[in-house]
Amino acid sequence: MVASLTYMPGTGDEDRQPVDLYSSHCWIGSIPELRTVEWDYDVTPGNLTGVTRPAAERHVKLICTSPAILDSMRAVFDADLLNRTPGTLTVNGEWSQRCYLTASEPDETSPSTVTAQLTIVLLDGVWRRDADTIQCVAHHGDTGNTWLDLPFDLPCDLQAPRMSASVTNQLPYGVKWRMIVYGPASNPRVSIGGNEVMVDVLVPDGGYLTIDAIKRTVTLTAANGDISNVFGKARRGSGQGSGTYVFEPIAPGTSVIEWDGSFGFDLTPVEERSAPPWSTLS
């Protein structure tokens, strides 16, 4: 069962509107094929290798009582295919995946209704949903960054206390995430569950740094809107599990977040499922 189903075109500007696939004139009433789960793998003695969730072709039935709407929908789908700009299919306003609608085969036609089989190519192999964003604000004391100077020397250097927060992953496997670091910030460093996320870059006042563990991109946006690729400035250690991997998944359970408090940032965990959960409507 589905409560809402939309397709956001990949072609167009920021004002483009989604195609409603569960409206009073055109609707897909059931999506069992979209909930189909199938992994790719190679069988080896005692185990599996090459385990992946590949792109998949699925078929759904569309019923439409407005030929004009059906024609405009097909034009949108065709534009994305011609431009190689996939749209995004969203189920019940929560779970999304990039896709193309590659075919439409009429089953039944009448003066008032058209029933057609749509072919949807799901590109990501997973459905994604943004979890709640954790907002970690910059902290500056009433006296700014000025600290009291003791009248004697110590055998060690005193530092400002580190700030902390936490993030909870309720799934039994690691999840990816997006982070936005707000300037000004110099070589921002955030520890998530003991893994250090570090980018050796100066984030200007009014600018921001975006780290996307899904797309594996690191970009710097200046105050005037100019965007630059700073992937090479991100520390990647020796890869996942090294303790300094910039795209390290958030582990199951609760992870402590620590940073020096000199800058603020938002952290958004992104849940991934093989299919839209059956409990989506609850």
Image (spheres, grey):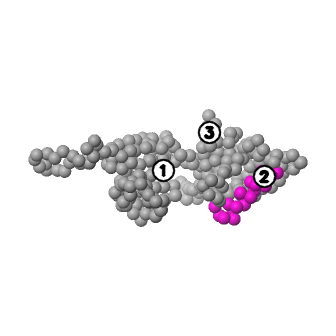
Judged from the image, the secondary structure of the residue bearing numbered disc 2 is: helix
Q: How far separated are the C-alphas under marks 3 and 1?
A: 21 Å
Left or right of 46, for residue 76 = right
Tell me: residue 171, above or below residue 221: above
Q: Earlier in the sequence, mark 3 or mark 1?
A: 1
- The residue lying at 78 percent from left, 52 percent from top is 70
Residue type at tag 3: Thr
Left or right of 146, for residue 168 = right
Question: Which residue is label 3 attached to?
Answer: 280
Left or right of 30, for residue 200 = left
Judged from the image, the secondary structure of the residue bearing numbered disc 1 is: strand
* 30 drawn magenta: no
- The residue lying at 33 percent from left, 49 percent from top is 262
Q: How far separated are the C-alphas under marks 2 and 1?
A: 36 Å
Main secondary structure along the magenta-highlighted residues: helix
- Quadrant (top left, top right, bottom left, bottom right) of the C terminus: top right
Which region shows up in magenta?
Answer: 67-86
> Marks 2 and 3: which is nearer the front?
2
Q: How far separated are the C-alphas under marks 2 and 3?
A: 28 Å
Nearer-the-camera pick, 204 or 258: 204
Judged from the image, the secondary structure of the residue bearing numbered disc 3 is: helix
* 78 drawn magenta: yes
Question: Which residue is label 1 attached to?
Answer: 177
For disc 3, the neighbor class at 10 Å (few under 14, some 14 to 19, many from 20) is some
Left or right of 111, for residue 37 = left
